[in-house]
Amino acid sequence: MSTVTEPVTTQLPPPRSEIGLVGWLRANLFSTWYNSALTVVVGALAAWALWYGLRWLFIDADFTVVSTLGGLLIIGQYNTDQACAGQNCFWRPQAALLLVTLLLGMSWGVAGEGLTRRIAIIVATVVALFAFLPYSLERMGWDVRLLLLANVPSLLLGWALARYTRLGTWRWVAILSVAAFLLTLVLLRGLPGVPGLQPVSVLYWGGLMLNLLLAVAGIVVSFPIGIALALGRRSRLPVVKLLCVVFIEVFRGVPLITLLFMSQVLVPLAFPENFPLNALLRAAIIITLFSAAYMAENIRGGLQALHPGQAEAARALGLPGWQTTLLISLPQAIRNVIPAIVGQFIALFKDTSLVYIIGMLDIVELSRKFATTYVENNMLPYLDDVQEVFIFLALVFWIFCFGMSHISGRIERHLGVGER
């Protein structure tokens, strides 16, 4: 009996031109003649732009104008003699910053390892490094430097509170975050008759501090208002639906800059004549309502994307309508539109720079006034000579916006958005 032997086949490796870096370049950039030509042209333009950009950045650019502005970019005119006469008010924003790092430490302790830990450590470290800026002690005293360095122990204290006390839950973090925000407003505004807390007019609030306060208030308040408007627009009650539709379409149909300008006249009409309504509160109200209108449409889109069979199954199980909405429909709708929600938050943060229309000096308007003053006083020949300031501002806004986008992406991957 003879046996048949099969020939031994040897599997050869793929050609070197199809694997590795060479294979990737050939498949993606030089697959055809027109792709090759386009790659060469775009590469030449990119090299030219990179050469002149890096040359300007490292040779011609002068970023000393940013250090000249210094703390004005952060808190505006808050610590000037006109705003806080007879005392040093710089400790108040720094105390508020300590509350932020404390809450970040608590969030780290609750969430454990991961993105929250990295964000908390990066924020506390960067803030503490500001204490080593090469300023003289007359411009940045030891009290300011020590308060900046205190953000590291504040972070560790928050972590310890979350790990070894009953405060280590997200519920307590949320409650303390609201309390910290209200305390921050009290610290910045001041209290009459309290030593060291002389009232400071909101007209002197400015810089990045103003942008962050408006953004945080707008994000936190506009989200629940937007959910309520989205549910109201889908309501079967004609009056509720009509009111929600009118509100959403009016605020979505008018530019924000126009609404801010009109807030000087229209918003006071909704309050008593002697009601203390300042420019900051007006801006916060308008920005919040404007963002809530767009948020409502994002949420409504998520609700309409759900299959009606889920609501029918909930009714078959005997769940009332409010439980079906709050426990089944709304969580899934919010999960599905996380990218749109975060996009709205990013737009809200950037829109805070429009408060210049009502005379408030945010970080952008403060820099513009500084540059204009330099040119008018012949300290600089052209406005372009302070373009480093605006490049620095673009970097600041990009860091915050990219941070929100990155966090959004991590949440989407964790929740499996678009996967299940």
Image (tube, rainbow, N blue to C red):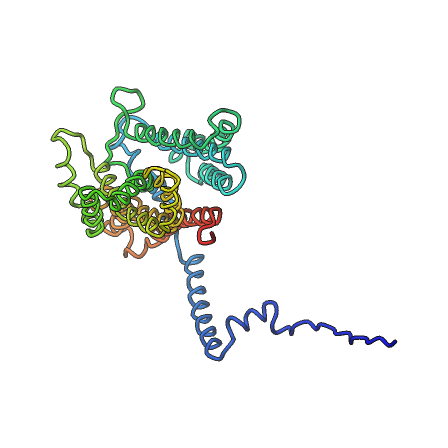
Q: Is residue 361 visible?
A: no
Q: Could you say where residue 43 lies in the image, as x and y percent from the top left?
A: 46, 70
* Count of marks overlaid on the render: 0
Q: Quadrant of the N terminus?
A: bottom right
For the residue pair 130 and 185, the one nearer the viewer reads as: 185
Residue at image coords 39%, 56%: 61
Q: Could you say where residue 17 lies in the image, as x and y percent from the top left?
A: 61, 74
Q: Is residue 31 visible?
A: yes
Residue at image coords 29%, 35%: 78
Q: Could you say where residue 15 lies in the image, as x and y percent from the top left?
A: 65, 74
For the residue pair 371 and 308, the one nearer the viewer reads as: 308
* Residue 16 placement: quadrant: bottom right
Relative to residue 248, is residue 75 depicted above or below?
A: above
Q: Is residue 202 left or right of residue 123?
A: left
* Residue 230 placement: quadrant: top left
Find the residue positioned furthest to the bottom: 33
Residue at image coords 30%, 20%: 195
Q: Could you say where residue 390 lies in the image, as x and y percent from the top left?
A: 33, 52
Residue at image coords 41%, 31%: 99
For the residue pair 299 and 358, the one nearer the viewer reads as: 299
